[in-house]
Amino acid sequence: MNLILLAAGKSSRIFKRIRKNKCLIKINRISLIRRIINNTKYSLIKNIIIITGFKPQNIKNELKDLKEIKFLNNNKYQTTDMVHSSVIGLEKSKFDTLISYTDIFFTKKLFKIFYKKKYKHITIPYIKNWKYIWKKRNKNIFDDAETFIIDSNANLKEIGNTINNNNLKNINGQFLGVLYIPKNYSKIIIDKYKFYKNNKLQFTQFINKLIHDKVKIKCVEYKDFWYEFDDYEDFTNFKKLKFKIK
């Protein structure tokens, strides 16, 4: 299995405060991106591809001791979004692939989900306790969170739309920024992206389009801690949390 780590963006909302790539934020002296890589020992991942863009040398310097990593650059990072970076990685992948944001914190249990079982379809891990996380992040769910609705067979029905008082009761969880793609789906993803002809598609918007095009997407619950560093407030609120980092 391959792991594609998305680290191309500038992260404008937080850069002025941290003055470095967001994936280099350190928790207990370990950067977010290195923590993800460290946890791959609990997985079947053999190859790691990092998609860079803004100040790539910062990330390469952080990981210079890890010789097995392959770096690919998204030269259009200023005018594209993470789906474009994902496609750059998928075009070089010949195996099942796990794609992950690098501004998130999760434990080894996420990788174990894909260690124990081989999924036949595109599969998305999600959290059910998302309201608790949004409260700790001090975020308004109606401004920041997005729809995530699944059916009784764990098929994703909707993602990425605005949450309101009418649909709140239907929300089953939240997207983590992680996506599993079996190798026979890689070309489908690449072809769909090129067909949509929208380089600025947000990841959840892209997934929603796949659903509308009848691409089956399965969901699996991740039952451990997860956190997203979207802005500097997320960073300061994370430091207030009291839990044992694994």
Image: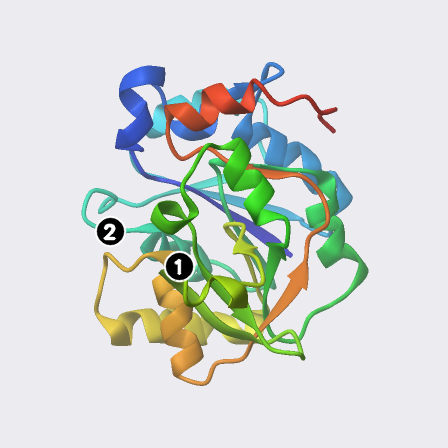
Q: Please, what secondary structure does the residue beneath circle 1 have? A: loop
Estimate the x, y position of residue 188 in percent, counting from the top left. Answer: 43, 76
Q: Say above or below: 210 vs 42.
A: below
Please indicate whether residue 200 sits to the left or right of residue 182 in the image.
left
Instruction: Residue 163: name its quadrant.
Output: bottom left
Give the x, y percent position of residue 4: 51, 49
Residue that label 2 marks: 80
Instruction: Tell me what residue is drawn at x 53 percent, y 19 percent.
Output: 26
Name the residue: 35% across, 30% down.
56
Q: Which is nearer the eye, 221 or 47?
A: 221
Mark 2 residue type:
Thr
Q: Earlier in the sequence, mark 2 or mark 1?
A: 2
Assign the C terminus to one quadrant of the image. Answer: top right
Look at mark 1 in the image and give the residue it sits on. 163
From the top left corner, tell me how far across and down residue 16 is, in percent.
27, 19
Q: Quadrant of residue 58?
A: top left
Q: Position of residue 150 (x, y in %)?
A: 57, 72
Q: Residue furthest bottom?
A: 214
Is residue 177 visible in this depiction of the protein? yes
Q: What colour scheme does the image use?
A: rainbow
Quarter of the figure that contains the N terminus: bottom right
The answer to whether one can see residue 25 in this image is no
